Image (cartoon, rainbow, N blue to C red):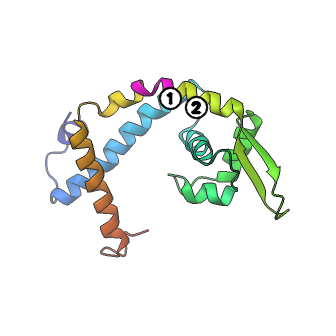
Amino acid sequence: MKLEEAIQQKKFIHEWQKATINIIYTSNWLSGKIKKNLKKHQLTVQQYNVLRILRGQSPNPITTSVIRERMLDKMSDASRIVDRLHKKELVIRSTCPTDKRLVDIVISPKGLDLLSMIDLEKEQMEFLLNNLTEEEAVTLNTLLDKARKRNAKGCCPELST
């Protein structure tokens, strides 16, 4: 469905405004689909993100501050997310041997099993963008990376983060 139809708006100030709104709309659409898939595993998108970070780091432990830096949603409270995952026995916390003030976190075998189960369902998630060819997906990724790179250089200081 075209953006104009989806949001019932025919005119945009310019194509950059339309592209921005299109990215926001598509992001929300994708998030909704992903949330629905993760809900059956009693996981939030943020919890899933933390588990994926920990699996990528495994078997080495990391701290919540490192998790926070690597999270997709920078506004998430990594400590609370880790607490919830610990209660579900999906992560293991232990005191850092080199700095007693820090807590090391690793994904548990139960967490790895859950991610493996979700990975098997990956085909369900991939259908979200399967109307793009692989080449188009590469182009989309390149364009999105380019958009973030340009703003990171401060072309629009009031919008940069």
Disc 2 residue type? Leu
- The range drawn in magenta is 119-123
Task: Write the residue at 21% across / 42% down.
Answer: 136
> In terms of depth relative to the viewer, which is nearer, 28 or 149?
149
Q: Residue at x 55, y 56 (%)?
A: 70
Residue occupying the far front of the picture? 59
Q: Could you tell me residue 122's position as x and y percent?
A: 44, 28
Which residue is tagged 1? 119
In the structure shown, which secondary structural element does the residue marked by tag 1 occupy?
helix
75 left or right of 33 in image: right
Q: Residue at x 39, y 42 (%)?
A: 28
On the image, the x and y values in percent for residue 119 come to 50, 29
Vertical placement of residue 134 versus 62, above or below: above
Q: Determine which of the numbered discs, if any, sits on residue 115 in the image.
A: 2
For label 2, the SS is helix
Image quarter of residue 125: top left
Cβ atoms at labels 1 and 2 below 8 Å apart: yes
Residue 24 in the image: above or below residue 158: above
Count neighbours of disc 1 (C-alpha within 10 A) and say few if under 14, some if 14 to 19, many if 20 or more: few
Drawn side of residue 112 relative to residue 32, left or right: right
The three-letter code of the residue at mark 1 reads Asp
Residue 154 on image: x %, y %? 35, 76
Image label count: 2
